[in-house]
Image (spheres, grey):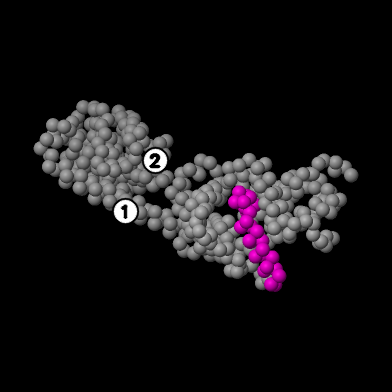
Amino acid sequence: MNSKTTITEADLNAYVDGELTPERLAAIEAHLADHPSDRERVAAWQAQTATLRSLYGHLAEETPPLRLSPWRLAAERRRNLRRVAMATAAALVLVVVGAGGGWVGRGLVMPDATEMTLVSEAEAAHTLYTPEVLHPVEVGGEEGAHLTKWLSKRLDRSLIIPDLAPEGFSLVGGRLLPAARGAAALLMYENVEGARVTLYVVPQAGGETAMRFTTKGDLTAVSWQVEALGCVLVGSLPRDTLMKLAKASYGSLETGANI
Amino acid sequence: MPGFLDDIETLVPALRRYARALTGNADRADDLVQDCLERAIAKQSLWRPIGPVRPWLYRIMINLHRNDHRRRRGSPEPEALELLSVEPASPATQGARLALAETAAALDRLPAEQREALLLVALEGLSYAEAAGALDIPVGTLMSRISRAREALRAMVDGPGPRLRSVK
């Protein structure tokens, strides 16, 4: 009788559940050999486990119904998000039409007509392309070097594509768009929850400005001018998040201007 | 995202098993699994830094089930357990069938926290550490819930008091 250690109910449970260390296992087995009532208890628990498994075990062997396919559920979710985005786009049109009546007085309130054009273009591009599932971008983010080279060439300036990964947004990719004067680049980023933001970049002369917020319906735009680039970040996210992303973008693009 | 969906797809059969044992009802079980998967897909950003996906899915399911239970409490007719539709894996004698039905009924009468804990370990085969993580309780608390669940089940199925049994 060298198993003088106290055996608790927790030990017996751990024995049934295979949670014992080899030394402890040996001690419990020795104890059970000498204690019929504990042996009986353990046997009853083991029988319970076996009963539970024969009651419900077959479910884990069945092929689950189609409605429980994660792929299908994820696709449904994407469709729903898209519907929300479309509704937002529709609401945006209404806001613009509604604001039409006050157009004459608009220039007096708004800071700069050029900047407003830029913001409108950026919002339109965002609304058009972010709901796109199959072709949100022309060149995917995985072809980063190619994207940088291509957009730099078409915008006729060296462009550094901001890395927003530290903020939780990965690059989906980019595309080239016609703008009021020449071409613009649209870069799209996405977080793990599928929320997308776009960064609209247009080469244009102008002094450096502060960051400005514009809100239309669900969409918020942060716009600024740096060196010879007009930039607008658009998304339907809280202001703080957008501001953080805009600052990160500003830092990268500014570095790019020096090259 | 594709890796994540592949991961959870392989876990759906086990989730159905757990949901069925937890609710005792086939339709409610699959609804619960669907809610759980939808929640997981929407919230997947939360698990990545924390750890393995399996205990996390059980945790989501348990929380949904508790909420659901809270909503149902006080509803006039509780849904009947599907005792008769129990389909054991192997053909069983009438006596064995009855024993299974008895255990299913007893399981349903356990306090929810004991049922959740026992099923995670005994049916789903989670380790104590994983199950405690899924329930967000210390391992010691988990073990005492499991122990109480086993003794309560034994008392309900085998009847009170010592019982003659051939142990050899």
SS class of the residue under badge 1?
Answer: helix
Q: Which residue is mark 2?
A: A169
Query: Residue at 47% across / 47% down in the picture?
Result: B44
Q: Which residue is mark 1?
A: A83
| Circle nearer the N terminus (2, 1) | 1
The local crowd at label 2, few if under 14, some if 14 to 19, many if 20 or more residues have their Cα within 10 Å, is: many
Mark 2 and mark 1: span between their CA atoms? Answer: 22 Å
User: Position of B71 compared to A182: left or right?
Assistant: right
Query: Residue at 17% across / 35% down in the picture?
Result: A114
User: Position of A2 compared to A221: left or right?
Assistant: right
Height in image: B112 above or below A161? below
Percent of width and height locating residue B140: 67, 41
Span highlighted in magenta in the image: B93-120
Query: Residue at 13% across / 34% down in the picture?
Result: A107
Q: Is residue B106 magenta?
A: yes
Q: Is residue B42 magenta?
A: no
Query: Residue at 69% across / 49% down in the picture?
Result: B148
User: Position of B96 compared to A208: left or right?
Assistant: right
- Predominant SS of the magenta segment: helix
The answer for which chain carries disc 2 is A
User: Position of B32 compared to A197: left or right?
Assistant: right
The answer for which chain carries disc 1 is A
Height in image: A250 above or below B136? above
Percent of width and height locating residue A140: 35, 47
Quadrant into which the C terminus of chain A falls: top left
Height in image: A149 above or below B158? above
Three-letter residue code for mark 1: Arg
**Camera-side residue: A139 or A102?**
A102
**Camera-side residue: B135 or A140?**
B135
The local crowd at label 1, few if under 14, some if 14 to 19, many if 20 or more residues have their Cα within 10 Å, is: few
Percent of width and height locating residue B14: 57, 57
